[in-house]
Amino acid sequence: MYKGKVGAAAGARGRALMALFFVPGIVLASWVSRTPDIRDAFGASHAQMGLVLMGLSVGSMVGILASGPLVARFSTRKVIAVAATMTALSVPVLAIGAGLASPWLFALGLCLGGLAMGGGEVAMNVEGAEVEVLAGRPFLPKLHAFFSIGATIGATLGIAFTHFRVPVEWHLGGIALVTFAIVPLCIGHIPRGVGLSGPRTAGDAPRGPLLTDARLLLIGVIMLALALAEGSANDWLPLVMVDGHGFDPALGSASYAIFAGCMAVGRLFGGPLVTKLGQRNVLLVSSVAGAVGLALVIFVDNQLVAGLAVIAWGLGAALGFPVAVSAAGSAGEPGPDAARRVSFVATIGYIAFLAGPPVLGLLGEAAGLRRALILVMVLCIISAVLVEVLRRQSRTADEVLAH
């Protein structure tokens, strides 16, 4: 009976977390799918649009840096509640910024949304890791899949609204109503007290600096590369297809919907793949698939090939973030220190979201958006190499322990 109650509670908790991951996905995709219209309303160049998009990156970075300490101080439930509410509040600001054609107000909305998403990131991943332990099987890929499901739905709606020329402010206003309806229903299923850092005793193991953990640093750099592969599509894919491959705005939005759909599929069905192949093999496949998809988008001047390449790009980026987070959480002893490791690696990954939009915007201004993506492709190749380094490092450690 007790186990049944625990299982039911964990199931409700997992479903609430999936819904809370869905919210930022649909919010992000809703405005990303309208970036050609938003860019035209602002009359912005690639470089100027990169600066607008930097609002999301700056907010995300501040949020992710604060998230770990906030979880330790206030618990995951309180951090998630505030972050989810802020995500919902950011959407009306985006809608008003788009309606007034104000890039500064729109950037403020992005900053608020980024602060909320980054701030809730560690808390929701710590919760997801606990559900993973309770379930006894991978849960984080499925959890992150609901972000991608939200993104797929948001992008699909963006295609329809773009086609029928629905004003961006009306589109985003409707999304705001959806988010305000979902958030209050979920918070009550998140248990109290998770993630709090209790008082340390003399018998506790010392908490060393994470910068000296070579394995964790490798995971962090892999996270950076694969996060940039995902983030560059979130920020730029519709414009890459419109400006780089001659798609019309509706087809540009469709390409992002395909990308988000592939992310959702990869994450929904990625759990058994992680169990069968292992974290390192999945990260290797992800890096290679992302690099191949990006290479085809960059170097092949064909709309059909570019559209198909988005599938490889999306599948490659799908498992990067959740598997890297899971690897970071299991990179040391279990316990309160897991939140520190997750926070550390997620912070490195969010550097990609901070630097990506302005850097790719400036490179796109100088050489075109397609060529700007060469940077992302090279980082995916580096990620594949580092996965092999990580594999050899782990094998060496196993051999030492065996002797």
Image (spheres, helix red, strand yellow):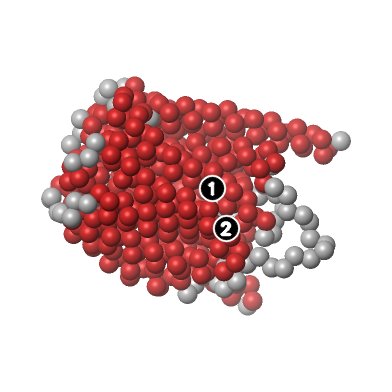
Q: Sequence-wise, which precedes: disc 1 or disc 2?
A: 2
Residue 41 lies left or right of residue 186; in this view the side is: left
Foreground residue, 242 or 281?
242
Residue under the point 59% across and 55% down: 137
Q: Tell me the quadrant of the picture where the C terminus can be found.
A: top right
The total number of labels drawn is 2
The secondary structure type at the circle numbered 1 is: helix
Residue 353 % position (x, y): 43, 43
Residue under the point 41% across and 38% down: 356
Residue 128 visible (yes or no): no
Residue under the point 82% across and 63% down: 202
Residue on which the image places disc 1: 347
- Amino acid type for the residue under numbered disc 1: Thr
Give the vertical position of 181 relative to 386 (above or below): below
Q: CA distance from mark 1 to mark 2?
A: 10 Å
Residue 310 lies left or right of residue 162; in this view the side is: right
- Amino acid type for the residue under numbered disc 2: Gly
Foreground residue, 318 or 59?
59
Give the vertical position of 128 relative to 242 (above or below): below
Q: Tell me the quadrant of the picture where the N terminus can be found.
A: bottom right
Q: Residues within 10 Å of mark 1 (few under 14, many from 20)?
A: many
Residue 250 lies left or right of residue 110; in this view the side is: left
- Choose top left, top right, bottom left or bottom right for residue 199: bottom right
- Choose top left, top right, bottom left or bottom right for residue 304: top left
Residue on which the image places disc 2: 68
Q: Is the residue under label 2 in contact with that under label 1 (CB below 8 Å)?
A: yes
Residue 138 % position (x, y): 57, 52
Residue 390 % position (x, y): 65, 34
